[in-house]
Amino acid sequence: MTAIVVLTGAGVSAESGLPTFRGPDGRWEGHRVEDVATPEAYARDPVLVQRFYDARRAALARVGPNPAHAALARLDRDWPGAFLLVTQNVDDLHDRAAAEAGVAEPRLVHMHGELTSALCGRCGARQRWTGDLSGAPDCPCGGRLRPDIVWFGEMPYAMDRIDAALSACDLFVSIGTSGAVYPAAGFVAQARAAGAATLELNLEPSAGSYLFAETRHGPASRLVPAWVDDMLARA
């Protein structure tokens, strides 16, 4: 049975109403990335950074999964072979779609962290957090809670698990990604080196489209359900 690894990026959640990572001017929701998405930014102005992620967390609560999230949750639930969904997104839309599909233990990795989680800067403990972090009480260890987001310069989560899945997969599918942010942008080359087939589903060609054996362009809410239907029909 085909072992599948799926990578998703901001393009999957854009159709739910969440903005993609950076706009044409290189700014992230009006802020320079260097001011809200690095450890140095947090050390320099923790109030600004906390308020930025509080606003994103509040915006996330107002949207829901779209048909692309739902289709991938269905694939996780019904695919009999090995499967891993790796998302660069920090929203919880894949998680909510999995819960709606009745997936008890989603085969899902948030490699860049989660908006609905808080991280202790001292002990590294993670805890679910859905409200504002501005003014939140400290961790029991005395450390300050920060957004559980992998900022530029930090190591993504679960890289050992991701590397193992890529090395063993038969099919790698990239959905809604720019193909420009590493290490995720290198996953297609890693999968190809392992002999896997590769497919890109994207609104338009990404920076790494030329690395894929097959590309399909269009909205994720249309392409992903069609691809999942085809995969499950052949399972």
Image (cartoon, grey):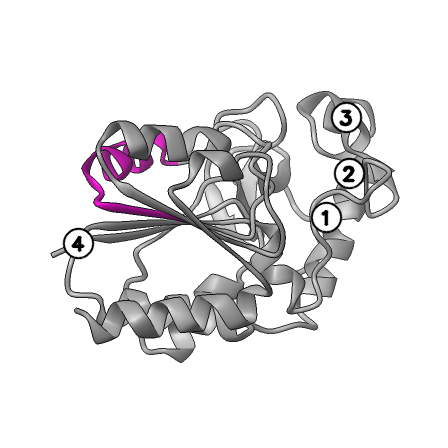
37 in relation to 18, above or below = above
Q: Name the amino acid type tagged 1.
A: Tyr
Q: Name the amino acid type tagged 2.
A: Val
Q: Name the amino acid type tagged 3.
A: Ala
**Disc 1: which residue:** 53
Secondary structure of the residue carrying numbered label 3: helix
State the extent of the magenta-drawn residues as a range.
158-173
Give the numbered dot on residue 49.
2
Give the numbered dot on residue 2.
4
- Mark 2 vs mark 3, CA separation in Å: 7 Å
Image point 56% across, 52% down: which residue? 176
Q: Residues within 10 Å of mark 4 (few under 14, many from 20)?
A: some
Q: Magenta part mainly helix, strand or loop?
A: helix
Label pair 2/3, CB-CB below 8 angstroms: yes
Question: Which residue is the extreme one toward the left?
Answer: 1
Give the numbered dot on residue 41.
3
Image point 19% across, 70% down: which residue? 234
Query: Where's residue 68, x and y in %?
Result: 49, 68
